[in-house]
Amino acid sequence: MRCNWLADVLRGAGLVVREADGWKNRGNPFSDGIQLAGVVGHHTASNKNSGNNPTLYTIINGRPDLPGPLSQLLLARDGSYDVCASGKANHGGDGSYPGWPSSANSYAIAIEAENDGIGEWWGAAIMDAYATGAAAILEHIGKGSEAFISHFEWADPPGRKIDPRGPWVQGGGGEDWWSGNYDTNARSAAAFRMRVEACMGMTPAQEKKLDAVMTFLQDTFGIDENGKARDMRLKLDSVYVEVADEGHPDTLGGRLVVVEREVRGGTGAHLADPDG
């Protein structure tokens, strides 16, 4: 099985895509009929002054110690994607994750994002493209946002990998949500999964809750009735992540309560339960 749909799915999500020569035949095929487990996020550790997509050749051809391809996708600093392979890539190494098969290489799509991993700022363009691309792939394979994991979450023993370091806490308009905390911890990874979820399609119940807060969004953020649901959820999440505490329910209704309390000083009860 080959993932020859990758370029079309990313373009369908509104992303800028380049197709590397020969990508549709690169990488050993996945086993026929398998269900992909999800997407694994990485960073390239390239020098921040090295250009837009300096690791493209390495991603395709590998390193002396590891043959290519090293990922199916390379996310450039400007938020565009290079599609490098349709088959398996050597990206996961030894590891495990609850509910996943024993091999990330054999069951997952990898995104390598250009960043030095030692403090380079993750700007809005690459952050939005990271979340949007992951969401589009997960929707295509029938998975939710929980199926996006970071390399550091996969890698064994714990601490063997730190990538992707930083995107969970930066970008999307300049907010540094956790005050510059670069720790690769569960809370920060969960925050990025919330970004991915914000880019995905919603259930009817979630749509109903969004209908209940349209006036709130219009009055507070200037998003009118023609605004996309994705834009609304991104804005809601951007406020929520700044003010929420770890013990608050991580549901759309729970986020609405926190957002209204922060922005308006209200109780948020009618937002969380539009039928109440």
Image (tube, rainbow, N blue to C red):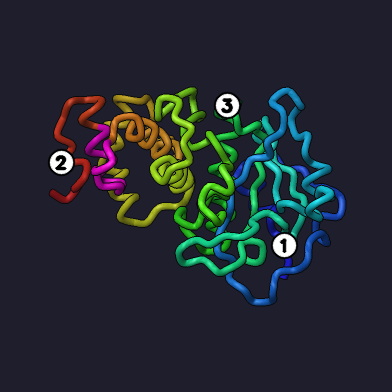
Instruction: Answer few, some or many: residues within 10 Å of disc 3's Cα (few below 14, many 20 plus, some between 14 and 19).
Output: few
- In magenta, the rendered stretch is 245-259
Q: Nearer the viewer, residue 204 or 266?
A: 266
Mark 2 or mark 1: name the one nearer the start of the chain: 1
- Check if residue 260 falls in the magenta segment: no
Q: Mark 2 near mark 1, Cβ–Cβ under 8 Å?
A: no
Q: Amino acid at mark 3?
A: Gly
Provide residue 168's location: percent of width, then percent of height: 48, 37
* Tag 1 secondary structure: loop
Q: Mark 1 near mark 3, Cβ–Cβ under 8 Å?
A: no
Provide residue 184's location: percent of width, then percent of height: 48, 41
Q: Nearer the viewer, residue 68 or 232?
A: 68
Instruction: Answer few, some or many: residues within 10 Å of disc 2's Cα (few below 14, many 20 plus, some between 14 and 19).
Output: some
Please give the name of the residue rendered at 78% of the width and 66% of the height, measured from the top-left corner: 28
Instruction: Confirm whether residue 52 shows in the render.
Output: yes
Q: Amino acid at mark 1?
A: Lys
Please give the label number shown on residue 269: 2
Name of the residue lying farthest toward the bottom: 33
Query: Mark 1 — residue?
Result: 88
* Tag 2 secondary structure: helix
Provide residue 74's location: percent of width, then percent of height: 71, 44
Q: Mark 3 near mark 2, Cβ–Cβ under 8 Å?
A: no
Instruction: Answer few, some or many: residues within 10 Å of disc 1's Cα (few below 14, many 20 plus, some between 14 and 19).
Output: many
Query: Mark 3 — residue?
Result: 119
Quadrant (top left/top right/bottom left/bottom right) for the N terminus: bottom right
Please give the name of the residue rendered at 15% of the width and 41% of the height, measured from the top-left corner: 269
Q: Please, is residue 200 above or below residue 262 in the view? A: below
Mark 1 or mark 3: name the one nearer the start of the chain: 1
Please give the name of the residue rendered at 49% of the width and 61% of the height, measured from the top-left corner: 97
